[in-house]
Amino acid sequence: MNRLIARSIFLSTKYVKPVPSYAFKHRYATFDVNDKVGNPNGRLRVEESHYCDNISSPFKEPYGNILKALNKETEKKFDNPHMMVCPVQAKFLYQLVGILKPKNVLEIGGFTGYSAIAMGAALSPDSKLLSLELEPKHIAVANRFIEEANLQDKVSVKEGPAGDSITEIANESPKKQFDLIFLDADKGGYIDYYEMILSHNLLSDHGVIVADNVLFYGEVHKVVDGYDGYDGVSHASKNVKRTAKKVDNFNQHVFKDSRVEVVVLPAFDGLSFIRLLSTLNLMSSVDVYNNANEALKTLSNLWQAMLQLISAVSDASASSLTVEPDLVKHQKSRKEYEELKTSLNATIAWLEKNKLTDLDKNKESKELSISLQQHAELQEESSVVSDKLKKMLNQSYALQFQMEMLFTSSQDISLN
């Protein structure tokens, strides 16, 4: 949750007075609202959270008791304990890690480590979880309880702004990828974090991004243009409404992104599950540039092959003594030419597809534009040479016919 707006959901614009943060229990986390404030018509169904928690399998020890102790200390030390996920959501994250069996997990927005410990408890022996957190005071609590849970070899916390930390991870380990990324930081930064994840290729091919609070107290759908199911009465503060708009911007951004597919679930405070459609669309400008050069090499090889064929046909035309072997050579070369042409067409098709993708997503590099221009010019020249080759080959076929007639005539003369 956004720390700056954490309390504002509890305020009514009309008749409810501010409530001190200590009056709220962490048990419901983002459900921690009542019917009067921010929960019209029981939108968040608080009592069902009680029920679901009670009938969900408890954490194995020592994790269950450690999480309870962390819960109490966070409530005691900080005025925003509701920034932790609720117990049943922690159990859900634990189950998700158990199902996906990720090798590397990234948490963006760790707070005091409640969700990190919940996920860490399900990690396999060789798996790692990295949690990003801004506040040193939160990290101190998180590290102490991580050690108490004996998870220090699997779970670590990195201090600093999330954006800077993501960049550092990408720079220090360019090939590092995460199979599960839990996004639960400041809502206004969701789009930036999301784009950094994809641009740095931090999400593995079969990885999942789980974004929390994407319905934000049930206010997000009310800020969507054209929404007509709302009666106009809201007890949420202006700050919450502004944040709800930012969350909707993120939801729309992901929904319109052709690189991924997403499903948004009305569970907890709203969860988005995001996965890549294809790693092909994540190729960087450098990758496409390199493939452009490969295409140019293929074109160059084709051009050289055609020039050799033209030279061979010319030589054959000048010498009747070697014309038959040369024509056999021409036929073989022509087959090689057709194979090269097929390969070239496939390369060009791939290049054009990726060129469009990269231009749309990354505004293409200058080097790639130059290479593509060279590719177009070379393709045009090769087409001209190809036409000349066809004419020469036709001439060689005519020459072959004439030579066959000549040989036949010579044989007839010899017999006579």
Image: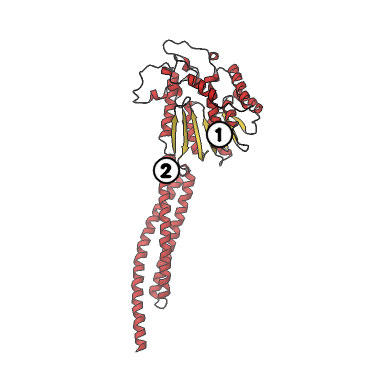
Residue type indicated by callout 1: Val
- Few, some or many residues within 10 Å of mark 1 (<14, 14–19, 20+): many
Q: Residue at x 41, y 69 (%)?
A: 330
The quadrant in which the C terminus is found is bottom left
Q: Nearer the viewer, residue 213 or 350?
A: 213
Q: Residue at x 34, y 66 (%)?
A: 391
- Few, some or many residues within 10 Å of mark 2 (<14, 14–19, 20+): many
What residue did someone put label 2 on? 357
Residue 82 visible from this viewpoint: yes
Q: Is residue 269 above or below residue 198?
A: above
Q: Position of residue 236 (x, y in %)?
A: 43, 17
Q: Which mark is residue 97?
A: 1
Chain-order first, disc 1 or disc 2: 1
Q: Is residue 176 above or below residue 149?
A: below
* Element type where label 2 sits in the image: helix
Q: Nearer the viewer, residue 404 or 383?
A: 404
Q: Which mark is residue 227?
A: none
Q: Nearer the viewer, mark 1 or mark 2?
A: 1
Q: Position of residue 22 (x, y in %)?
A: 55, 14
Q: Residue at x 34, y 85 (%)?
A: 412
